[in-house]
Image (spheres, rainbow, N blue to C red):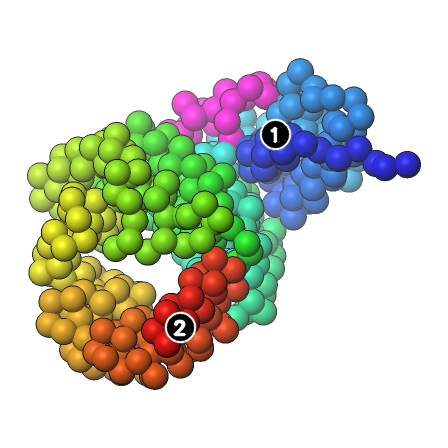
Amino acid sequence: MTTPRLDAHAESLLRELAPQVLGSTIRRFKDFAASEDAVQEALAAASAQWPKEGLPENPRGWLIQVATRRMTDVMRSEIARREREDANARTKADPWSKFRAEGTTERDDTLVLLFMCCHPALTASSAIALTLRAVGGLTTSEIANAFLVPESTMAQRISRAKQTVKASRDPFRMPTKREHAQRLSSVLHTLYLVFNEGYTSSAGAALHRVELSSEAIRLMRAIYRRLPHDPEVAGLLALMLLTDARRPARCGPDGELIPLDKQDRQLWNREAIVEGVGLLSRTLSKGAVGPYQLQAAIAAVHDEAATPDDTDWPQILALYTLLERMSENPMVSLNRAIAVAMVQGPAAGLELLDHLESDARITGHYRVDAVRAHLLEKAGDHQAAIAHYTKAAGKTTSIPERDYLLSQATRVK
């Protein structure tokens, strides 16, 4: 007899609700590891019961109830009572209390969970990694790929982060005014990484994970509504909109990757472009320019070009040069090398790649080989280009990117 399975709608609903239920559970019981286990049990129970019994009237409340029951079983009632009393006392002085309404299961706790995970006992990188796991639902491998570190290193980092929070006397909570700026930076970077994983999945058969990129945009909108005058909040939302606007043209009928210069620009989401450019224009006029605003400006230059030949590469190069001064991210330097090649010729771009490959954080990354192959092809060295296209294809774990790189190697032949 075949066991009933969740349909696509129910699976999508569980992915959406998981971080909300986790946030609610952590906020109530103040134990990340135990709450994570409880929520996993609730999700497993839903996967087993919902196909047979149908979706409950309130799926979110159902999951919270099951997770809460599990937590109540494993935690002594006196500790749970004292924790709830402490949480109620803190709420009175919590400047973010408007984000939630205690005692109800009808609110969205994902935004609360974002700030809660950026715990003051953690380093920024550990807080971001923990949040990507809890809120984004990313695997350890995917998080390691985003940080350019081995999977084993990231697994240890996440484990230490949980232990650090558990050992601290400061439970998961929303930030005070003093902590707000520091935590906001980590939250923004986390959403940036979640969006990137959704826009270009690091592994698997699909180029996009729309549920991730859409959730990142939704949460950024929520933050922007509360902090409309923060330049980097507006900048990151603009960057997401301007980038996601190109998504409808990035895949062919069989899911194959279509590079920017080959896309049908009529398919781009003009409404998202207009909104993103408007956000960017308003925030740039305030004078304080940060990395997200610069990346949004680069995306806007691409989006506003009617054809690939109309792209203002000198302006993009100038923006990447400024961004590189602000950032120590080697991926920024890699993108700048492409811009240099477009303005000054492939030889100049290849020279920058030679210097960049000494950076241990990016040595061996498939994108370095992919960019080198592209520039070698433009320089006329087809045999070397084929070798590097093939080498890059062997390193990526994304099937659409692998297939695209192999097709490029075949085309050059």
Residue of label 1:
9
Q: Are marks 1 and 2 in contact (CB under 8 Å)?
A: no
Q: Quadrant of the N terminus?
A: top right
Give coordinates of residue 135: x percent, y percent.
52, 43
Label 2 residue SS: helix
State the extent of the magenta-drawn residues as a range.
91-109
What kind of residue is marked 1?
His
Q: Residue at x 9, y 44 (%)?
A: 287
Give coordinates of residue 75: x percent, y percent.
75, 38
User: Which one is closest to the eye, mark 1 or mark 2?
Assistant: 2
Q: Residue furthest right?
A: 1
- Name the disc covering residue 144, or none: none
Vertical side of 321 occupied by 57: above or below: above
Who comes first in sequence, dot 1 or dot 2? 1
> What separation in Å lies between label 1 and label 2 (alpha carbons)?
39 Å
- Residue 101 among magenta residues: yes
When asked about the image quadrant of residue 65, the answer is: top right
- Residue 76 among magenta residues: no
Alpha-carbon neighbours of circle 2 within 10 Å: few (<14), some, or many (≥20)?
many
Vertical side of 380 occupied by 198: above or below: above
In this orientation, which residue lies closer to the viewer: 198 or 106?
198
What kind of residue is marked 2?
Ala
- Name the disc covering residue 409, or none: 2
Q: Residue at x 37, y 40 (%)?
A: 248
Q: Residue at x 45, y 37 (%)?
A: 215
Alpha-carbon neighbours of circle 1 within 10 Å: few (<14), some, or many (≥20)?
few
